Amino acid sequence: MSGDIACAEGALSAGCRFFAGYPITPATEIAERMAERMPQLGGVYIQMEDEIASMNAILGASWGGLRAMTATSGPGFSLMMENLGLGIMTETPCVLVNVQRGGPSTGLPTLVGQGDMMQARWGTHGVYEIIALSPSSPQEFFDLTVRAFNLAEKYRTPVLVMADEVVGHMTERVTIPEEVPCFPRRKPEFPPGDRSSFPPDEDLVPPMANVGEGYHIHVTGLTHDERGYPVTDEVTQERLVRRLVEKIRGHKKDIIRLEEKGVEGAEVIVCSYGISARVGLWAVELAKREGIKAGMLKLLTVWPFPEERVREVASKVKAFVVPEINYGQIALEVERSAGGRAEVIPLNHMGGGLHEPEDILKAIRKAAR
Amino acid sequence: MKRLEVKLAGFGGQGIILAGQIIGQAAVLFDQKNAVLTQSYGPASRGGACSADLIISEEEILHPLVLKPQVMVVMSQEAYDRYASEVAEGGMLLVDADLVPVLPRRSKKRDVFAIPATRLAEEVGRRIVANIVMLGSFAALTGAISVEAVKRSILSLVPKGTEDLNLQAFERGYEYGKRLAADKRERSIKT
């Protein structure tokens, strides 16, 4: 099946029963599949008037108790940015899929890009941490969508799945397991009515009472106290926003997943994500055939960035080669994390196609000399 | 088989992508190989240029796009003009001779097989199954997938009620392809 279909099926396996979206190439097939499958499973599919409303709708559905998702691409992702922040501030579990195409603006609707990686990190305003995963095959698109739902519930935050047009549209073997892991919603341990304050657990994540369960709840994008009511002062801001950041930063070990191939003993590391990691791995194989000690560091989790591991690897290798379909976004993070311990060579492609394996190979050769 | 790269090209509405899906699914589900299908298309769903890129391999497929197709199936003059020169040396080009009137030049570097797919499709009932005729010839000439696997794949992917028509189209294309392969063997023995 195609990556987009695998994504929809992954969401459904993970218990997603609400999809709101506005179709956009190359993410349309996700909406199409959801429109077909949701009624069969008693779920809800709504085609919204735009992406602003789509993002709002999934936040509302999540507070209503459903696992909710939307899927979009470039221009739609931009429109979702404001309410992504609302989801972060209100600690609303949900999944936002971006099947990236070439940009800026409407750019290349039917062709590949990876230009939204920094937008994923910093696209909405204010101070926050975000979780973003990046698949490089339809199977990973399935698996990471499942994982996104679980991370969203575990840390009560929107989770981004940053795919791309090639992964979304390519058709490949996908194995769907009988059962997938399912992290349940963190419910309050006290009965409704007693109190309406929801202090965080030890891991900094508060329980969540759904609308209609009898609890007094208040949900706002304004800086708020543990009851959910606005308290717009410095002290409350410090307490709330620091916790929102720390609940992610403090659990990087749990959130970050890397796939390493031949990193130990390597001199040159190709560090990449999504479809570029796949092409990168081929270049690594070609380099090894030439006797070059090359390894692969694939980022399944892009945000939070695995800076500790990159720093560690940086002290043992000559260089990182970072192919990505943009003008250098994650390469900046690799450079920051490497902190001068190893050379970082960005390999940029403007979009509309993939890197030639030969070009990555040339960069590896040069770095190995 | 290490890595076989196939490009199928024509215009939207001919079932180019479907043909790619049928071959890919046959390879993956019934022949237990790996396959990746990608496609390129313009803004229009019908009439515009359209191509399906397919890679079949017994190994893990890393680069998912076709770089230098060893086999190309062409079903429009435009697709022929645009892509035919990309066929790898020693590769083969299969054209629907009814849709590519400018006959391909013979070349030592690659084999060219002209298949009157649209006419054969009309003979079995409807010209719309010309893609499946080409698929039959593809199976016969490349041997990349087993006949049984393609048939099962066809049955699971074509619209209900058209199974017989499609299977007949496949058989026609397969027979024609076998004959072309035999002719080629004969020619090479003579020369």
Image (cartoon, coloured by chain):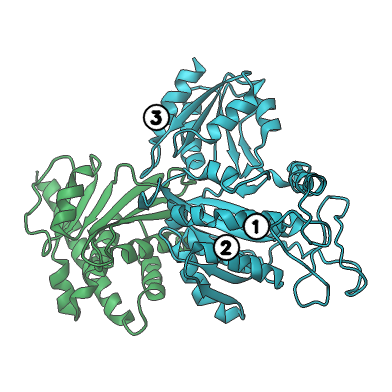
Chain colours: A cyan, B green
Query: Which residue is rendered at x = 77% and y = 67% of the image?
Result: A218
Type of amino acid at the residue the image marks with label 1: Leu
Query: Which residue is rendered at x = 59% and y = 63% of the image?
Result: A10
Residue B4 or A39: which is nearer the viewer? A39
The label number, if any, that marks residue A55 in the structure image: 2
The span from disc 1 to disc 3 (Cα, nearest Å) is 42 Å
Secondary structure beneath dot 1 equals: helix
Q: In this figure, which residue is indicated by the disc labeled 1?
A: A86
Q: Nearer the viewer, mark 3 or mark 2?
A: 2
As drawn, the residue found furthest toward the front would be A233
The label number, if any, that marks residue A359 in the structure image: 3
Query: Which residue is rendered at x = 41% and y = 34% of the image?
Result: A357
Q: Nearer the viewer, mark 1 or mark 3?
A: 1
Check whether the beta carbons of the residues at disc 1 and disc 2 lie within 8 A of each other: yes
Disc 3 is attached to a residue of which chain? Answer: A
Disc 2 is attached to a residue of which chain? Answer: A
Q: Quadrant of residue A194?
A: bottom right
The span from disc 1 to disc 2 (Cα, nearest Å) is 9 Å
Secondary structure beneath dot 3 equals: helix
Residue B167 screen position, x and y as percent: 30, 76
The span from disc 3 to disc 2 (Cα, nearest Å) is 39 Å
Q: Nearer the viewer, mark 1 or mark 2?
A: 1
State whether residue A67 appears in this view.
no
